[in-house]
Image (spheres, grey):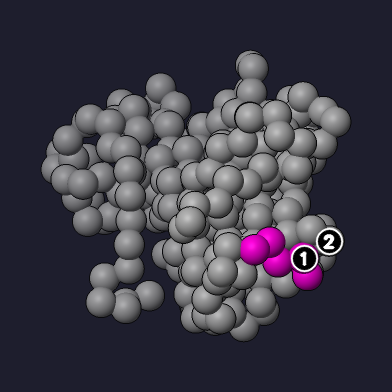
Amino acid sequence: TGYREIDFNGGGADDDACERLVILPDQRIVLAGVANLPGSAESGFALVRLHSNGNLDTTFHFDGRNVINDDSMFTFPDVVDVGYDPTRHRLVVAATALGLSVAPGGTLVAVGDSGFLDPTFHSDGRRSLRFSEFGGGAPARDPGATWLRRLLMRPDGSFYLAGTHENSSADAAFYGPTDVALARLSPDGTDDSAPGAGFSGDGVAFFAYSGIGYRNVPTVERARVGDTLEDAIFYRGNV
C-alpha cells in the first residue's frame, strides 16, 4: 500500500514522535524521535531501522526498535537530528535535554550497527554537553542553556553540532541574549580541540549573523540582539 505505521516502543500507546529520518548507504531507513520507555512514563531516544521494503530490520536490537533513556531522572530528550557514521557503522542522535528547573542542554547517544549503545563513544555511548563548557578552564562564554538543532557528520566520523547558546546577563550586555554556536566533536565523543589542529581553538565557535566570529569582532560592530539557529547544511561538500 506504500504506507507503514510503526510504534517505536512496540506498545502502541500513541505517544511516539518521529523527528528525523536518514537513509543508510545500503538503502535501509532509520527513523529517530522520542517515545516512552516500555512500561514507563519516562521518555527516551527512539530509533527504528527498516529495510527498504518497509519491514523492520530485526538485526537491529532484536526487533528493529530501541528506546534509550538519557541517563537522567530529571530531564527528557527532545530529539532534533540523527547522523550516520559509515566508517563505524553507527548512528549518532542529538537532542536537547529538557526538564523542570533545569537549564536546557545538549545530549547525545551513539548507537552501533547492532542497535545497542556504542561504548567507544565517550565510554558509554552517551554524552551531555553545553556550548559554554567548551574551552576547559577558560571558556569563551559564561554558563548558559544550549539548544541543539543540527548534527552534521563528517567523512572521518567527527561531527558538528549546531545550535543556540543563551548568554548570561553579563555576556548579553556585549553579545545579545543568544548566540549561534557551532561545536566539533571527535569520533570518540570528545571535544575536537587538539592544539594546532582543533576546531576554533577550543572546539566551539560563537557568532552573530552580523559578524564573522566572536573573537575578532569588536563589540561596537555587533548588533546586541539575539541570534538563534534554525537549520544548517554543508555547502558544496565543504566540511
**Residue 221 spot, x, y in % from top left:** 14, 43
Q: Which mark is residue 58?
A: 1
Q: Magenta: predominant secondary structure element?
A: loop
* Amino acid, disc 2: Phe
Q: Which residue is mark 2?
A: 62
**Residue 232 spot, x, y in % from top left:** 33, 56
Closer to the camera in the image, 51 or 140: 51
Question: Do the numbered discs 2 and 1 sit on residues whose CB atoms are within 8 Å?
Answer: yes
| Mark 2 neighbour density, 10 Å: few (under 14) some (14–19) many (20 or more) | few
Left or right position of 183 against 99: left
Closer to the camera in the image, 179 or 90: 90
Left or right position of 200 against 189: left
Q: Quadrant of the C terminus?
A: bottom left
| Mark 1 neighbour density, 10 Å: few (under 14) some (14–19) many (20 or more) | some
**Secondary-structure class at tag 1:** loop
* Amino acid, disc 1: Thr
The residue at the far front in this view is 1
Residue at 67% from the left image edge and 79% from the top image edge: 88
Magenta segment: does it hold 71? Answer: no
**Residue 6 spot, x, y in % from top left:** 62, 46
**Residue 87 spot, x, y in % from top left:** 62, 83
Residue at 56% from the left image edge and 37% from the top image edge: 17
Read off the magenta span: 55-60
